[in-house]
Amino acid sequence: MAIRTILHYPDPRLREKGLPIESVDERIRTLIDDMAETMYAAPGVGLAATQIGEAVSLFVIDVADEEEPSELRVFINPEIVSKQGKSCSREGCLSFPGISEEVERAAQVTVRALGRDGKPFEITADGLLGVAIQHEYDHLQGKLMIDHLGVIKRRIVHRQSLKRDLE
C-alpha cells in the first residue's frame, strides 16, 4: 500500500471522467488499498480515483466516526439509479484543502456498483453516506464541489485555491 498524491483544484485532471473498469483484478485491488490509505491519511471520508490521477470509475468511502471501527466501502463502476428529496449541508473536499461550502444534493440516493470482490450490490443511503456517494460520484463525472456553487461563491473559492497554490 502507498499514500498517493491528491490532486488539488484547479488541476485539469480533476475534470477527467472515470472510465469503466473491465475487471476487478490485482491492479484494481492495489489501487483500492492505496486509495483507502491515502483517504485515511488525509484525513477524509471519501476519495475518487480521479482525485489521484487515475481516470477509472472507482471511489472509496468511510463515514464511521473516529470512535467506531472502520467501515470502508468500495464502489466500482457506480451508477446512481435514483435520487429523492433535497438536502443542503456543508461539504469539504480533499481536492479543495481548507475550503468547505454549503452544497445542495439529493436527500437520498440509490446506487448500484461492484464491490472490492467484483460482485454487484445496490445501496440506498441518506445523511453523510448519501452526501459522500453523490460527492465522489460527481468526481467520476468530472464535476467538482465548486460546480454546485453560485457564480460569486465559485469565484471566491477559485481565487482561494489559486492563492493557496502561490503560498
Image (cartoon, rainbow, N blue to C red):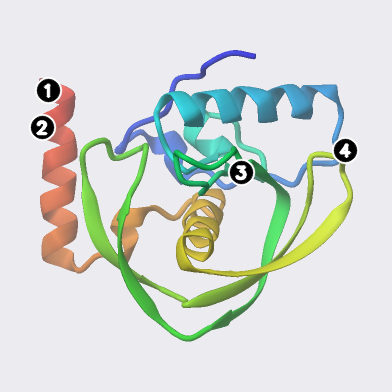
The residue lying at 47 percent from left, 67 percent from top is 127
Q: Amino acid type of disc 3? A: Phe
- Determine the secondary structure under disc 2: helix
Query: Which tag, 3 or 1, sits closer to the chain's start?
Result: 3
Contact (Cβ within 8 Å) of mark 1 with mark 2? yes
Residue for badge 4: 23
For the C terminus, the image quarter is: top left
Q: Which mark is residue 140?
A: none
What whole-number distance in Å separates the C-alpha atoms at marks 2 and 3? 28 Å
Q: Give the image location of residue 132, x and y in percent.
A: 49, 56
Residue for badge 1: 166
Query: Which tag, 2 or 3, sits closer to the chain's start?
Result: 3
Q: Which mark is residue 59?
A: 3
The residue lying at 52 percent from left, 47 percent from top is 64
The residue lying at 51 percent from left, 25 percent from top is 38
Contact (Cβ within 8 Å) of mark 2 with mark 4? no
What whole-number distance in Å separates the C-alpha atoms at marks 3 and 4? 15 Å
Q: Within 10 angstroms of label 3, few (less than 14), some, or many (20 or more) residues?
A: many
Q: Which mark is residue 163?
A: 2
What whole-number distance in Å separates the C-alpha atoms at marks 3 and 1? 29 Å
Q: Is residue 92 above or below residue 53?
A: below
The residue lying at 49 percent from left, 49 percent from top is 139
What whole-number distance in Å separates the C-alpha atoms at marks 1 and 2? 5 Å
